[in-house]
Amino acid sequence: MKSKIKYRSLLIFGIATVFYLYELMLRVSPSVMVNDLMTTFGATSTMLGVLISFYYYAYTILQLPCGVILDRIGARNLMGLSALLCVFGSVLFAGFDRIYVAQIGRFLVGAGSACAFISCLQVASSLFPKKYFVILAGVTNMMGTLGGLFGGPPVAKAVNIIGWQKTTYWLAGIGVLITLLIFFFIPKDIKKKRTEKSFRSVLNAILKLLKNSQVILPGVVGSFMYLPISAFSELWAVPFFMSRYGINNEQASLASAMVFIGVAIGSILLAIFARRIRSYVKTMQISTIFTSLLFVLLLFVQCNVYVAFGIVFLIGFLTGAQTISFTCAKNSVTSEFSGTALALTNCIIMLVGAIFQPLLGVLLDFFWNGKVKESGVRIYDIDCYNHALLVIPVCLMLAYLLSVFVKETIHSESE
């Protein structure tokens, strides 16, 4: 009987992480469509950054409501409805050549994706012992980064063969299948609260968490640690490699893929490393220092493209430590508020993505030298990218400084 319960728990957790994998595919797929999107919508880098960041606007705004709703209605209902939103948003994104409709589509995809990560963490927290949470958070992050990997070269190849719009329709079809898996195999009562809370009590809980520096600080540190993914790999890595090495989008998408492969491996190994050295904080500090140095190396040291792929793999590997920030925040509150604390942490992390994707677009336009293609689309040379992307290692060093004030929580996991 225990064995059956164990495998059932793994199945439920597995389906939840597949949904997270899927939403990462949708999140990063525009990175291999940059030139196509600029051509279709006549967009500059600033306009494109804003279009893609509409995902983050919805994702960030809905983090706290999703945390409360997750505690109230359970993971199955929330994930199932969210997957349907992803499908509808994808169809809207690809179905029209008006940029405002595409923005609405990306907003809906972001809204549907908002619950994916915290649902996985809440399922893990509900079905498995507390001491395994940091490992399962790493597994969740690994699945998400595999979604980022699948959203790279495979999607780029599909875009080159059938076009970006038909590719997006196929992604919507995958979402329909995942919706069916969620409703058929995940029970209704995963982490569903039996007692109803008033709006005032929920608001008071959120305000209490906002005053808890040991929830806010890990969120801020984690947000800067996530920049190599949210501000680089998810949008600007492919055009950066195309500009520096003169390769096409399919080849350049390998750079984004290497980041996600690195994160997939690092999420697990660095979680194990953190438990081995008995310090979450030191692990995050090691990550921020070396990721910052590697990013400077990538930007300003001319090297072979394959060496550059190796560098972004290492950047991804070290970025895998970012999920530890969720564990630090979760361990700083009681189990009653764990769902909302995880949502608040994710909200902070995604807010930075919403800011930095268009910010990098603005910086690219600022450093733009005036060159355009025959179609009128702007050409951004490597100097534009180097100056704009320098903001990432600067923020990583700031994350190191802030991590000094994060309390160590690993000793609270003896149960």
Image (tube, rainbow, N blue to C red):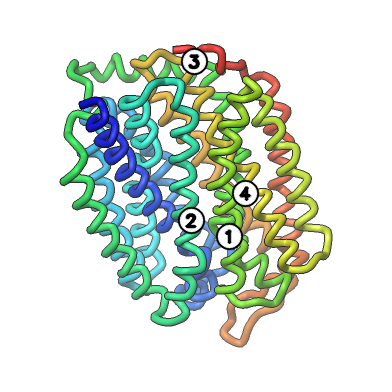
Residue at horizontal 40%, vertical 39%?
117
Residue type, mark 2 in image: Gly
User: Which of the marked residues, 3 or 1, is nearer the chain's N terminus?
Assistant: 1
Instruction: Give the image quarter of residue 379.
Output: bottom right
Residue type, mark 3 in image: Glu
> Spatial distance from mark 1 to mark 4, Cα to Cα?
9 Å
> Spatial distance from mark 3 to mark 4, Cα to Cα?
27 Å
Which quadrant, please, contains the N terminus? Answer: top left
Residue receiving disc 2: 148
Return the residue found at the far bottom. Answer: 374
User: Which of the marked residues, 4 or 2, is nearer the chain's N terminus?
Assistant: 2
Instruction: Give the image quarter of residue 266.
Output: top right
Q: Nearer the viewer, mark 3 or mark 4?
A: 3
Residue receiving disc 1: 256
Mark 1 closeness class: few <14, some 14–19, many ≥20 residues within 10 Å = many
Q: Is the C-beta separation of discs 3 and 1 under 8 Å?
A: no
Mark on residue 205? Answer: none
User: Which of the marked residues, 3 or 2, is nearer the chain's N terminus?
Assistant: 2
> Spatial distance from mark 1 to mark 2, Cα to Cα?
8 Å
Instruction: Measuring from the top left, give residue 148's x and y in whole percent.
Output: 48, 56
Residue type, mark 4 in image: Gly
> Spatial distance from mark 3 to mark 1, Cα to Cα?
35 Å
Residue at horizontal 39%, vertical 46%?
58
> Spatial distance from mark 3 to mark 2, Cα to Cα?
31 Å
Along the line of sight, the residue nearer the viewer: 320 or 5:
5
Q: Image height check: is 388 above or below 239?
A: above
Mark on residue 413? Answer: 3
User: Which of the marked residues, 1 or 2, is nearer the chain's N terminus?
Assistant: 2
Q: Is residue 68 left or right of residue 57?
A: left
As helix, strand or loop, the secondary structure at mark 1 comes to helix
